Image (cartoon, rainbow, N blue to C red):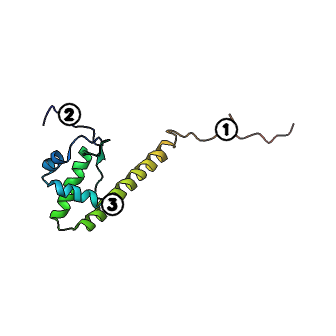
Amino acid sequence: MLGVPRPDGERGVYGISVAAELVGMGVQNLRLYETRGLLEPQRTEGGTRRYSADDLDRLRRIGDLLEAGLNLAGIGMVLDLEAQNTQLRAEKEEQQWLKTASIPASRSPKRTSSNNKPRSTRSR
């Protein structure tokens, strides 16, 4: 939708029934995925689940992997590997950035004296 701001990706704003409807899954499926450790929605002080936009994206990914034929154990492994891959890429990019940031933009050759002419060997 245009004009409607997307909520903070990490902030839990959707109740379980709304989240289930938004991703096209049953409420019991969301509870099962949480039980199996595939996602961890935030909880209110009263214990009510609150799903974030990131949680909805993860639920859609779970649905895609289910359609591809993976079982829940396999989905857990794929999601863990994807998270590790994302972390490694971020670390690599940070290392590359730090490496390029520490190299001075222009290096001038070091001079041993202000006059580069050969010294005279005449004795005084």
The residue beneath circle 1 is 116
Q: Secondary structure at mark 3?
A: helix
Q: Secondary structure at mark 2?
A: loop
Please state if 119 lies on the left or on the right of 47 as rendered. right
Badge number at residue 5:
2
Residue depth check, mark 1 versus mark 2: number of the one nearer the observer: 2
Instruction: Return the x and y of residue 71 as percentages of the image width and height.
Output: 22, 68
Badge number at residue 80:
3
Q: Tag 1: residue type?
A: Asn
Please state if 46 lies on the left or on the right of 108 as rendered. left
Q: Earlier in the sequence, mark 3 or mark 2?
A: 2
Q: Tag 3: residue type?
A: Asp
Marks 1/2: CA–CA distance? 65 Å
Badge number at residue 59:
none
Between 14 and 66, the residue placed more toward the observer is: 14
Between 12 and 115, the residue placed more toward the observer is: 12
Instruction: Return the x and y of residue 37 as percentages of the image width and height.
Output: 30, 59
Q: Tag 2: residue type?
A: Pro
For the point 18% across and 47% down, the residue is 19
Instruction: Return the x and y of residue 118 as percentages of the image width and height.
Output: 71, 41
Residue depth check, mark 1 versus mark 3: number of the one nearer the observer: 3
Marks 1/3: CA–CA distance? 62 Å
